[in-house]
Image (spheres, grey):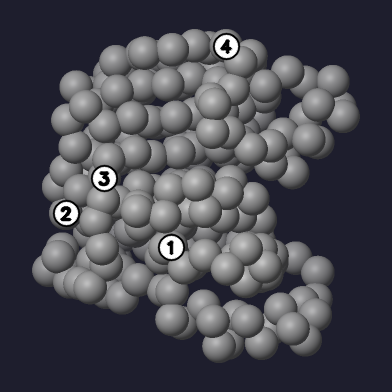
Amino acid sequence: MTDEPDRQWRNFYGRTRGKTLRPLQRERLEEVLPRLTLRGVTREENPARAVLEGVPEPLWLEIGFGGGEHLVHMAKAYPEVTILGAEPYVNGIAQFLGKLEAEGVGNVRVHPGDARDLLEVLPEGCLGRAFLNYPDPWPKARHHRRRFVTPEPLGLLARAMARGAEFRVATDIEDYVRQTLEEVPQAGFELLRGPTDDAWGDWTRTRYEAKALREGRSPHYMTFRRR
């Protein structure tokens, strides 16, 4: 018996496709994405190290990278780091690949799917930093269990992060701040900074942050450390 029906409501995301892709975007998905995609990320039992075979360390992870503004920015700023990105939205991945090509950086690897599937097979303690930027807020109370800042995904993240590793969270939703401050420490992290309206020194504004500001919502930035 599969647990697939139970997993569906636990997804952190909604749709996986948007408007029709342009020919160049489709070409990048077909030709570039396979070269960056991590292998062996399955729901079956998997030799954990196989997922990272040939992937240089140190490793950071962005959970849900959207259109890739932050991921590409960080990859360019830290060429000595391999930045992993998990994103299920095909249109966002296509936009990310265009930015990656424009900036000429290659120190990234991608899981085009649910971040939880990747976290389940990453080796314990392999991540030195993780980012959760403007995650889907799932504003209705009955959907709060689909937020990333809930016990199961946070437990997977904590297992994959090294002691002392940094976990950054950015959101414009007050209730997401509340839940983050409640749940993240219980998963094995301590709050280092925030919530504050001052971004990190190496931060770059994403499209989601720009939208929040246009609509009158204030950004909140929080930094945690893996205990």
Going from the N terminus, do you reach mark 3 or mark 4 first? 3
The residue under label 1 is 108
Q: Earlier in the sequence, mark 1 or mark 3?
A: 1
Contact? badges 3 and 2 (CB < 8 Å): no
**Image location of residue 94, percent across then percent down:** 66, 70
Q: Residue at x 61, y 27 (%)?
A: 171
Q: Position of residue 165 (x, y in %)?
A: 26, 32
> Label 4, label 1: how many angstroms apart (C-alpha)?
29 Å
Tag 4's secondary structure? Answer: strand
> Which circle marks residue 123 in the picture?
2
**82 displayed left or right of 16:** left
Tell me the crowding category of disc 1: few under 14, some 14 to 19, or many 20 or more residues within 10 angstroms, Cα based: many
How far is mark 3 from mark 4, CA to CA? 24 Å
| Quarter of the C terminus within the rendering | top left
Type of amino acid under label 2: Pro
Query: Label 3 belongs to which residue?
Result: 127
- The residue that label 4 is drawn on is 196
CA–CA distance in space, label 3 to label 2: 9 Å
Foreground tag (2 vs 1) = 1
